[in-house]
Image (cartoon, grey):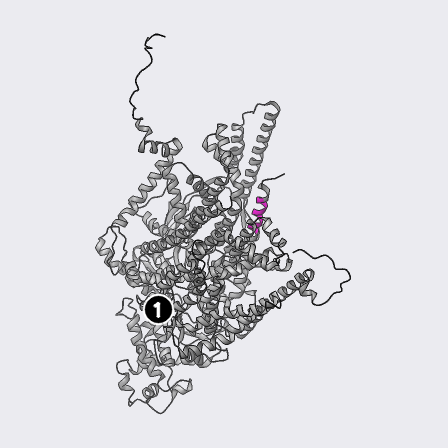
Amino acid sequence: MKKTVFVGAMAAATTLVAGAASATVLEEVQGRGELHCGVSTGVNGFSAPDSTGEWQGFDVAICRAVAAAVLGDPNKVKFTSTTGQTRFSALASGEIDILTRNTTWTMSRDADLKFSFAGVNYYDGQGFMVNKALGVSSAKELDGATVCIQTGTTTELNLADYFKANNMTYEPVPIETNAEAQQQYLAGACDVYTTDASGLAATRATFADPENHAVLPEIISKEPLGPLVAHGDDQWGDIVRWTMNALVAAEELGITSANIEELSKGTANPEINRILGASDDDLGAMIGLDKEWAKRAISAGGNYGEIFAANIGESTPIGLARGLNALWTQGGLQYSPPFR
Amino acid sequence: MSDKMISFVRTEMLPEQTPPSSQVGAMRWVRENLFSGPVNTLLTLLGIAVLYFLAVHLGPWFKNSIWNADSLAECREILAGQSGACWGVIKDRWHQLIFGFYPAEEYWRPTITFFLMLVAIAPVLFGGLPRKMMWFSAIFPALAFWLLWGGSIWYSVFAMLGFVVAYVAFRALQQVSGVVAVVGAVVAAVIWWLLLAGPLGDLVASVVPVALPYIRSDDFGGFMISIIIGVTGIALSLPIGILLALGRQSDMPLVRWICVGFIEFIRGVPLITLLFTASLLLNYFLPPGTNFDIILRVIIMVTLFAAAYMAEVVRGGFAALPRGQYEAADALGLDYWKAQRLILLPQALKISIPGIVNTFIGLFKDTTLVVFIGILDPIGLSNAIRADSNWNGIIWELYAFIALCFFLFCFGMSRYSQYLEGKLKTDHR
Amino acid sequence: MATSSEIPGASFRLSMLIYDTRYRSITIQIVFLFLFMAGFAWLVDNTLTNLAEKGKDIDFSFLGMRAGYDINQRLVDYTNDSSHLRAWIVGLLNTLVLAFCACVTATVIGVIAGVLRLSKNWIVSKLMTVYVELFRNVPLLLWIIVIFAVLTEVTPAPNAFRGETPSASMLLFDSVAVTNRGTYIPSLLFGRSLGDVNLGLITVSTNYFILLLVLIGSIWGYRKLQSDALKQQEATGIRPTTWWKSLLILTLPLTIALMAMGAHLEYPALKGFNFQGGGYIRNSFIAMWLALTVYTGAFIAENVRSGILAVSRGQSEAAFALGLRPGRTMSLVVLPQALRVIIPPLISQYLNITKNTSLALAVGYMDLRATLGGITLNQTGRELESMLLMMLTYLVISLVISGGMNVYNSAVKLKER
């Protein structure tokens, strides 16, 4: 009697079956007019839906920039929330075109899981947060502590290595989501909460009493976080990589969302002209896009510095300093290869 | 015989006395029901202690409820250190808990669909309603699909027409042979769906555009997604479950073994592994380049899961039929499918309805597991709401609201299934 | 169904494969098998193609590699240098322990609640009704999360036990500490250790082994005593007094063995960040255990109730007529008969508990799904292999449980003659 629901499903299936595997990701994205982007299920400042259901955050802004470059509209993005468990399969299966979910660039993820990292949008490292009342000032004093970790990330391996190297013991408390881990930590069910330092700062910012919690000075790992795409389509990888680079280069060259219209009419700096498509060089054609791709990407949310400041910078509740993520000219690591 | 008075016999009636206070009204009830013995007294005191404990600990929390607040901090300010529930979060986010990220101006669509669904299942659940309503039940799935996802109505219409095509083909070929007719009907329907329905839908849509704005299934969430997964899972699993139950009872060993293997496999693994399969592996099993929506993948796996349980429920229904029914069908000279269709299945299904409803309640509750694969069901949304700085740290109010909604829904269904069980019991005595 | 009688002299024609009921079932089976195999081959072919396209293969050698992550609750030796295979076993044992504990307590709670729901006591029966309906009609996952949140928020942190005037104190003469990390209980230590025996997978303390032997011996002695007493009762009609003998047999050898090995209790004490010493039951385990117990207990209560109602009223009336008190009537007359109705649904509840232990990931309990199907899968990227192994493991557990319980079921089944 209800067999007829089957038809609905069949109709859905036929409309949802994607194009043939031979099409490039770019063609596919442009064909469907929408970028599929994998984000986390909710990390304050990096990606979280607001009360209207709009996704907001630092990682989200990268997706919007790519969508603007490829499709001309930063809002033509379908966000798929992924967990630490499901993110890689979602990307490998082609369910999402690009994954921007605080994902650490490691060799095995690159070579063994077959993903290409398109760069680093946030240089991070694993840190520890403790309640100041514990009187701990260094991670070396954490012998015997109970540590809350988010499962499905590199953090649990780093943690095991760190405590082993320092000949200390600990009691791991694996937790599935950030919200859950925070609840455990605040209730005192674990002494320490460990995750990427940016995540710690973001979490700490939401506490009622952030001044009572300290992030310990030790950073026990390198966590270069960046967007990644599946192996096998270098053009698509290039698009994401150079969109990121354009955002960084824009900051370096002083292109902001405020002056971009002005600058795109032509300036004395030939590199600005090349990026914004104001000169005769057609950089966009090299990656299968038009001349103004980078201009659209930068207009979407501003340059790298603007995106940073708007979502996680010091003026936001999360209050992260630029640190390693400052431009190379200001002592940081953010550095874009030349546009030429 | 003199008029001698018997002095020890009373001559007049005494007025009725009121019974002792321990034998009437509330006192008697209390004595008989609460303090009839030492064990009973102890239990009563224990029960009262439990109630008192709950009242003391939860009472103030409910009493100091706050409905008008935009953030947890504001709630705490108003409460000034007292314990109290901050229902402001529900007021602020109830639409997300129910509809997910479905566009607010389209909320009428899922709402109407929900009420239409009640109308559509009513003739199945309550025998007294006119049989004509079944026609609405039959077209409801396509209607619901169109209302929820939007897009052109013609795809749904043409998808439904596939069944008409199948029926026509069946009728045309029935003269040849029963088997040929069934195969022909299936083939005709499949050809219709795969080759003709889509282009025809495009064609008609371009001439007579009747369309609603298209909503992506990623925007679905909250209780809406639980109900969609639960209801479609059960509806689709029913035919599969019936076939599996028939297969399990079959005289043909090969068919039986395969069906038993399938049922036992599905019933032997937790639903969560099947959901992970939907999310991690299903794309590996399908031809390269196929990419299903995650919700569709979940519905596929949930359907398989429910089908195995449904098969057992239906098998129970068959087992409850008296042997004479089978023999009577044979005696009438009906072939296998006619016997099943006309005699056995209707009776077996009728007996199975309480079991089917119970399977549905179980499945509906189990839809909460989709949170583990990143679908924003009510529990997933409660996590997302807690990630927002305004509501960071709120716990009980969200859980209480979600639990209440599930309770109302499931309790209603289970009451219905009990009522039905009672009704069926009298039928068979 | 009814096979037509043999038609003499009819030679075999091809059309008989469809029209002759004798052959038709064979035809159908062969077609069915063919379709099944074709479908299966299609899936396998797709999988291989997809894997090849992504440059992956099917390879189980990751099981031998170093796991690299820590597991907090381990019943066998495990460090982060152990292999993924061992992590799998650790997770499997955690699943089994949780399932076993939950089955036992859920049965107890279920029987109590089911019996009490039929009690004449109005308050108690209504309370039990509320309990059963409340837990049956709200998803288990929600209960797990709520119970875990209650344990986290309501119980004190270890820090609360610190300082001059601690805000929390240990229970039962300072031997048990209930914290929001878990419950610390005293554990048994031996002054004279007899060394450990390494059995490959696990290391067994010889002391415990000896205790076990003594216990088995005592129980055997007790049963012997009882059967001797019964024999004497049957022979003479007088049952000898045995209670002090049984008490002695059950306790004396055990006490002597414990004293000889210098057994003493080690109490948990607050040292550093946590309580040290003694046993430690993590809150993740307690939350799962409690949630599975009360949730499944509600279902079992319903099974028990319907089982009891299925026993005809005449049985309890007869028992009352014999002068049995209500409690004895229940335990001696009604429950044993109700058991036959209760056991089949009970088996499926046990299966449900076992399968529902996989929800442990909501609270971070390191069960089979969290180790093999969680961290291992995620760190190695071998989703196909890990999922396959995990499903097979669950399948085997389920089949063993239902097989075992079916044997028991047929043993207690009413023997009809």
Left or right, C151 with respect to C351, comes to left
Residue B372: x and y in percent read: 43, 61
Residue placed most toward the observer, C179 or B109: B109
Residue B226 appearing in the image: no
Q: Quadrant of the C terminus of chain C?
A: top right
Left or right, B63 with respect to A171, comes to left
Q: Label 1 lies in what chain?
A: A
Residue for badge 1: A47
Residue A24: x and y in percent read: 47, 80
Residue placed most toward the observer, A142 or A72: A72
Location of residue B244 by image quarter = bottom right
Q: Is residue C408 magenta?
A: yes
Position of A204 relative to C161 (above/below): below
Q: Residue furthest front?
A: B1
Residue drawn at 70 percent across, 57 percent down: C4
Residue C182: x and y in percent read: 40, 49
- Give the residues in magenta: C400-409
Residue B363: x and y in percent read: 45, 57
